[in-house]
Image: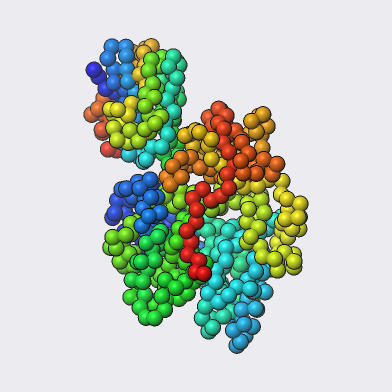
Amino acid sequence: MSVYFTKDHEWIAVEGTSATVGITRYAADQLGDVVYVEVPAVGRTVTQGGEMAVVESVKAASDVYAPVSGTVSEANEALGGAPETVNEDPEGAGWFARLAISDPGELSGLMDRAAYDAFIAGL
Amino acid sequence: MADPTGPLETTALTGLWQGMGARMVPFAGYLMPVQFADGVMKEHQWTRTEAGLFDVAHMGPAHLTLNARPAAPEAAHAAIAALVETFLPCDVAGLRPGQLRYTTLTNAQGGVLDDLFVGRPADPDSQGSLYFVVNAGCKEADFALIAAATAGKATLTRADRSHTLIALQGPKAVDVIPNLVRGAASPKKLGFMEYGVFTGPFGALTISRSGYTGEDGFEILVAADQAVSLAKLLLAHSAVKAIGLGARDSLRLEAGLCLYGHDLDTTTSPIEAGLAWTIQKVRRERADFPGAARILRELAEKPSRRRVGLLPRDDKAPAREGTPIHTPAGEAVGVVTSGGFGPTAGGPVAMGYVATAHAAPGTELDLIVRGQPRRWVVTALPFVPHRYHRPA
């Protein structure tokens, strides 16, 4: 399994053409207390960089963008009743959706963990 | 407002907050703490159950004093009241010594230029003077308006740089406030919307029993060079934590209190905003304040729209400022002006303006969140009951 990151602070864990997507610890900490998550419908087609989900803190709503293009195969419906999971375990149980990747070539434009860590250190 | 492109202003407490690791954001031209390590949710709950300390030094405290004060205290107060009632719609003449009133500055069209406090000093030797606290984002315009309207007759002395305004809010605030004063006079004896000048280890303090959270609490005006010491003394108390602007906003929203520039602006009248109570009978009868024609007409005939509270029927998605409000049949009837998550309410809460025909509590309306209608219900404000200290 390989994990990649976007400049918008999403992570994507890839196994073959299947991937799990969420937001990073950095993003969750920046958002603060998450009070609402809107996950995508299963079967929906998403486009790299396009809106995929919504995460809301007490203060504000933020879009979560698809790191790569694909079709939603599963959504983390548990977040509906427990949005705080995104703060508690953003890179684990706080995942948003699983995707069937349509163009694995899009992964080459993403960052690995070391590159992402360097990116947020510079923010 | 401070120049939005210029450098941010700081308060006397900015360094203290940075040293505590607060997340700092620009707000009304100032660099302000939006949240501390605990985060908005815990800071909000702490203020509702213990005591929260808020840096509100961006706001605009000021004193207006007659240039020639009549010797008799009542005559001095009557003279300054007559002067400010030309631009304020509230009953200033009728203020008791030591009383504060919440009021608005209205324009000739009856729109709200700002919402503010005006207070009459308790001290007989200080009559002929008034205490104002205006909003940060409006203070330059407000002070210019007040100075122009009173030119030659009174002098406005700003206290926003010489002094620092700090709020201590929550049910334990009353246990902590005595630490700031010495002597027989105690701010514990103040009722809601009363204030006085007290002295203690940090010099003379103007302390009011007021705030922006719906809880009991105090607002403290301290000399700027004493502000850090005073804040540190308060924060050393086990009941007190520093609270950021994030929780300040969720607390005031649950309390149903307006945020200028969002729930109030130059297009909204005090009547539409549900602030008719801030215009006392004596002023309605005299009809001599800016915008009186519109305001009195709306009082008599009902305004075309009203500010209302809104709660989701069974939804968990917050509705933010700007969310369109429709009837279930799809007719556009309003807009959300403040919306978010209420930690004490335990779910989303919102305020907005809707056409008067749809403003009755219990009316079901659709809020259009990300293009999808979601069923909400008009609800009486506040969402969380006020717990102000009102001695019998």
Vertical placement of residue A17 versus B63, above or below: above
- Residue at 32% from the left image edge and 59% from the top image edge: B239
Vertical placement of residue B368 versus B262, above or below: above
- Image x and y of residue A77, in percent: 39, 24
Q: Is residue B109 left or right of residue A79?
A: right
Observer-nearest of B175 and B284: B175
Colour style of the rendered protein structure: rainbow
Please identify the residue farthest to the front as the structure is shown: B392
Q: Is residue A74 visible?
A: yes
Q: Is residue B288 left or right of residue B337?
A: right
- Image x and y of residue B232, in percent: 30, 64
- Residue at 63% from the left image edge and 60% from the top image edge: B277
- Image x and y of residue B36, in percent: 33, 50
The number of numbered badges drawn on the structure is: 0
Q: Is residue B3 visible?
A: no
Q: Quadrant of residue B78?
A: bottom right
- Residue at 63% from the left image edge and 39% from the top image edge: B363
Q: Is residue B52 left or right of residue B86?
A: left
- Image x and y of residue B14, in percent: 36, 58
Vertical placement of residue B132 versus A87, above or below: below
